[in-house]
Amino acid sequence: MRKKVTVVGAGNVGATTAQRIHELGYADVVLVDVVEDLPQGKALDMLESGPVLGSDSQVIGTNGYEETANSDLAIITAGIARRPGMSRDDLLLTNMKIIGSVTQEVVKHSPNCILMVVTNPLDAMVQHAFRVSGFPRHRVFGMAGVLDTSRFRTFIAQELDVSVEDVQAYVLGSHGDDMVPLVRYTTVGGIPITELLSQDAIDRLVQRTRQGGGEIVALLKAGSAYYAPSAAITQMAEAVLLDKKRILPCCVYLEGEYGIDGLYMGVPVKLGEKGIEEIIQIRLTEDEQTALNKSAQNVRELLEVMQNSAQSAG
Ligand code: APR
């Protein structure tokens, strides 16, 4: 029997993810959105590409959750983008409500699923989904590091005029301006980039990686990135669906690892059919640890805003 994947949010990221997973051919996809007929239309369009692509996987669109029952994996991309005049906190609290209600529905219909969160601000949203789901930590994680790392790898490959396949990199921390690219663990064909690029060039590429999301937003004018995000999600989905035990940076709940307790942060993990099968701890330099702590502090501030709002509402 084919595995079943639910994708909540049939916008740019969700629909492109559904398309990528459908094209792999070994998992059925249920696409959910609040907008009437939108997920149904996109799902039907994808399904009709099956004969050309040679994919027998089923794709259905729905505005409810009955069809999502017993999914192996649920990917949450639902949310709103920041609109003009909207504060960062407004966006945070609106998406928090969306993530809360979506998580409840997903969990009710698929109590044994693995939950991957994509909606921004990522670290805070996945922490909220974790709390609402009541799932163990290995079954709730977020996608950010694979995308950030992919951007970093793209820029390094361009700079050195080498294949992207030969560039390995790591980006830790929260998804945002204070992500922590681990230059020491970044290699090209096994050679540390410090041997191949000047410090100035490395700093420039790190800075471009930090602002990678913003660079796309500025170009698109409306909306944000989705081709690279959906590719990153699909790589993680494949690690789970095929039990690949990939070593990838994911946003996971730390309980003392990296000196951080009770917080979601991006770190390298082993990803397989059970979800997060291991948190891989690498030794950080003082500077890297300081950067990671700063990243953690910024996420804690978002969580505080969320907590205060929940308290004043309750
Ligand atoms: N349930 C289901 N779907 C919802 C809900 C909800 N409660 N609320 C909003 N949505 C849907 C919207 O109707 C829309 O179709 O979520 C979709 C979001 O799609 P886009 O606006 O196209 O946003 P997208 O570019 O896909 O980004 C989604 O992923 O990378 C992050 O920052 C990005 O948080 C954003 C998310």
Image (cartoon, rainbow, N blue to C red):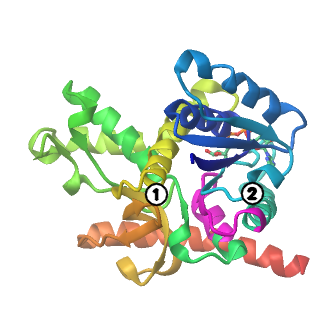
Hey, which quadrant is residue 164 in on the image?
A: top left
Hey, which quadrant is residue 23 in on the image?
A: top right
Vertical placement of residue 192 versus 300, above or below: above
Vertical placement of residue 237 versus 276, above or below: above
- Residue 294: image x %, image y %? 45, 69
Mark carried by residue 69: 2
Q: Residue furthest top?
A: 52
Residue 5 magenta-drawn?
A: no
Specify whether tag 1 is near ligand 1 (CB below 8 Å): no
Residue 123 magenta-drawn?
A: yes
Q: Is residue 64 left or right of residue 111?
A: right
- Residue at image location 71% in from the left, 55% down from the top: 88
- In this view, the residue in front, 129 or 179, is 129
Q: On the rendering, which quadrant does ligand 1 occupy?
A: top right
Q: Which residue is mark 1?
A: 178
- Residue 101: image x %, image y %? 81, 62
Mark carried by residue 240: none
Region of the chain picked out in magenta, as a range? 108-129
CA–CA distance in space, label 1 to label 2:
38 Å
Query: Which numbered disc, 1 or 2, marks the residue that appears first in the sequence?
Result: 2
Q: In the structure shown, which secondary structural element does the residue marked by tag 1 occupy?
A: loop
Is residue 21 visible to the viewer in this orientation of the structure?
yes
